[in-house]
Each structure stands twice: as structure tokens, then as C-alpha cells.
Image (cartoon, rainbow, N blue to C red):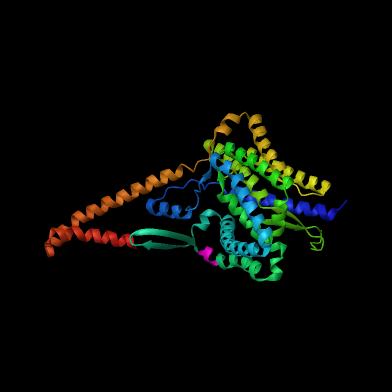
Amino acid sequence: MDWDLISSYAGLLSLATASIYAGSFGSLPKSPRKSSDAPGKSLLADQDDDDDEIPDRLSSGDAWLFPVFGSIALFSLYMVVKYFGKEWINYLLGWYFSLAGVGSMWKSLISLATFALGSERWKKFDKTRLLILKGPREVTSLSFRTPSIVLFPIAIIPSALYTFSTASRKSVLLTDILSMSFSHNALSLLKIDSFKTGCILLSGLFVYDIWWVFGTDVMVSVATSLDVPIKLLWPKSMSFAAERGFTMLGLGDIVIPGVFVALALRYDHHRYSKSSPQASFTKPYFYSALAAYISGLATTMTVMHVFKKAQPALLYLSPACMLSFFMTALVRGELKSAWSWSDEPEKSLESVDAAMVDTKSDRNESATGNADQAPVEEKVETEPDASETESKPKKKRSKKKAI
């Protein structure tokens, strides 16, 4: 028995499972906001922290198109590699993933720091906000806490080493760090809206993976030609020696089933938060889906080892994840409710928006009251014109808005 190869499979399986586990919890909505004595200030602060907390959900219509666009992208890469050589595509994609890797690593480090310190302690750090205006219109705004500034130079290091150092470019450690960062952020941001959409997505990519792996050599050719951090690697040696090569798992085999596992966790969170909203909650659907992913990937590795041929991982992962959902829902008697459930953004955000509107209206009313009183005070001293007394409060408010 080849223990070196078995340890390599185990290491790769551990990395993939850890990526899905962390990314799934990263996809959970933030806990409901608490009221404060200064509602306007706290609501605005929380809104700044959650600017990127409501990404668009993938619908069933989007899920049908995934295999189509995936096939177009894959075949285009294959044609470029075949007729123009892999050097050009590796050069362009290398720079793209280097720049994207900085942002991905930065976000992952911030998530890790927030988890380590706790969200309440994290929010106590000072916040810096960068606001870009074009005239009176806001173009974009960025806000970040003080530790985020310290973490940014650290986030540059992996991408810089991978891009500019020939020796580091072949580093399995750097490749895995960047790849796990990409997968974590993809699972945190890429969300499907229902189990129906998830089943459509997995079914479509089930056929996609079988065709491009068994039907042609396109998938294997592209995967072995691209030298970019979109795959997990593990040495085929217990001593981590690189002489025997590496086992490899593409990020698609992590992210695609991973979004389904993350959806199962959000459904567990939804079920439990309706009855007793707490930080800890039972996770039957999540653990079932995660166990199905582990068993599906282990089956893939076993078949690949026995037949000595590359296997389409989604051939085993897609049915395993879907069966885990249906079996868990049937055993618990919740199939109808789970199938009809839709993962919509948190309703608490709507109440926040309403509260912000009320806060703004209160400010407008107080500003109007001050405007009515201001001319009376000035009439005693200078008796200005009515037009001047009306324009002064407006100028003051517009100046405050510009700040």
C-alpha cells in the first residue's frame, strides 16, 4: 500500500473540507443589529460594516446558464493554449490573479481577524472612510477599520512572491494559500437562492464535467497547462518532497458543491433563528451536506487511484450533495418547506433602512425648526431680508452634506 499517496489524498481532502467549512460560515448573515441611544450613528456605522453583506443571489435562470458559459470559457482557453501557446495565457492570467489575490487575501485576513477578535471588539476600532464625490453625487465610498490598514501590506506578500519570484512561483504553499483565499471569498459572496437552484446548478455541471473530462481532453489539457493559483496541490510524499509530483484539485470542485453546502448552513440558521435566535444553532442539513462532500470526494480519489485516470469530481460530488439534502429533509419531514424556502436578504436590513429614513426626517424637521427660529434672532440685530434668512440655513445644510 502506497502510504505516501494516501497521505497526499488525505491532505488534499482536508484542505478542500476546511475551505468549504470556513466559506460556509463566511456566507452566514450578520446577527441582527441592536438598538442604541444614538440610533443614527449606530445604524450608519453598522451599514458601513455591512456594505458588502447583501450580494445578489443566483436564481434558477442563472443556474441553467452556468454550464453554457463555463463551456464557452473552457473551450476558449483550450483554443488559446492550443494555437497560441500557454505562455501568453499564463502571463495574462498570472497578472490578473496576482492583483485579484491581493484583494482576496486582504478580505480573508480581515475576516480572520474579525473572527479572532470578535465582531463587538472589532467594531471598537477607529474607522476611516474614503468618500469620492463628483459634484454633489457620491461616486463610491470605502470604509475600513484601523487593523485593516495594517493587514493590507501583509496581503500583498503572497501575490508578490508568486508573481516576481521564480522559485516561489513553484511553491505549493503559496499556491494553496492563494487558492484557499479565492475559494473562501467565492463561497462567502457567491450565493444561490434556494435548494431548487442548487439542484439545477449541480445537475447542469454534472453533465458539463462528464462531457469535458470523458468526452474530450479539453479539461485535462487546460488544467495541466495553466500555471495560476486556481487549484489545490499536495505533494505525493509524507516528507513533502516534490520529486513524485502532486495531487491536484481544481477550485471548481470546491466552490460549486461548496455553495450548496453553504446554502444548507444558511437554511439551518434560518430554521433555528425563527424559534430561538442565538449564536449557536443545530446544523443537520449542513453536516449532512458536508459529510456527503467528503464521501463524494473520497470516492473520486479512490476511483482515480484504482483506474489510474483523471475523474470528473462532480460526477460523484453532485449526486452526493443533492441526495444528502433530500434524505435529510425526508427523515425530518421538512421536504416541502425546505424545497419552497428562498434565501432572501435579511429583513432586518429593511428595518434599518426605515429607521435611517426616520432619522433623516427627524433631522430635517429639527433643521426646519432651526431655520424658522434663525430669522427672528437676526432681526433683532440686523433685520436682514427674508430671502437672505431663508438661504442661510440651506447653505449651512448643504455645507454639512459636503463634509
The single residue placed furthest to the right in the displayed view is 1
Q: Position of residue 17 (x, y in %)?
A: 69, 49
Relative side of 360 to 346, left or right:
left
Vertical placement of 296 versus 155: above or below? above
Residue in the picture at 80% in, 57% down = 236
Residue stretch in magenta: 146-150
- Give the quarter of the image for residue 177: bottom right
Relative side of 280 to 297, left or right:
left
Residue in the picture at 88% in, 51% down = 1
Look at the image and say whether residue 147 sits in the magenta stretch.
yes
Q: Position of residue 197 (x, y in %)?
A: 58, 39
Q: Position of residue 130 (x, y in %)?
A: 43, 63
Look at the image and say whether residue 46 sits in the magenta stretch.
no
Q: Position of residue 402 (x, y in %)?
A: 33, 62
- Give the quarter of the image for residue 392: bottom left
Relative to the observer, which residue lies in front, 102 or 396?
Answer: 102
Vertical placement of 384 versus 214: above or below? below
Residue in the picture at 64% in, 39% down = 203
Dominant SS type (magenta)? helix
Relative side of 348 to 380, left or right:
right
Relative to the observer, which residue lies in front, 378 or 189?
Answer: 189
Residue 22: in sight, yes or no? Answer: yes
Residue 228: in sight, yes or no? Answer: no
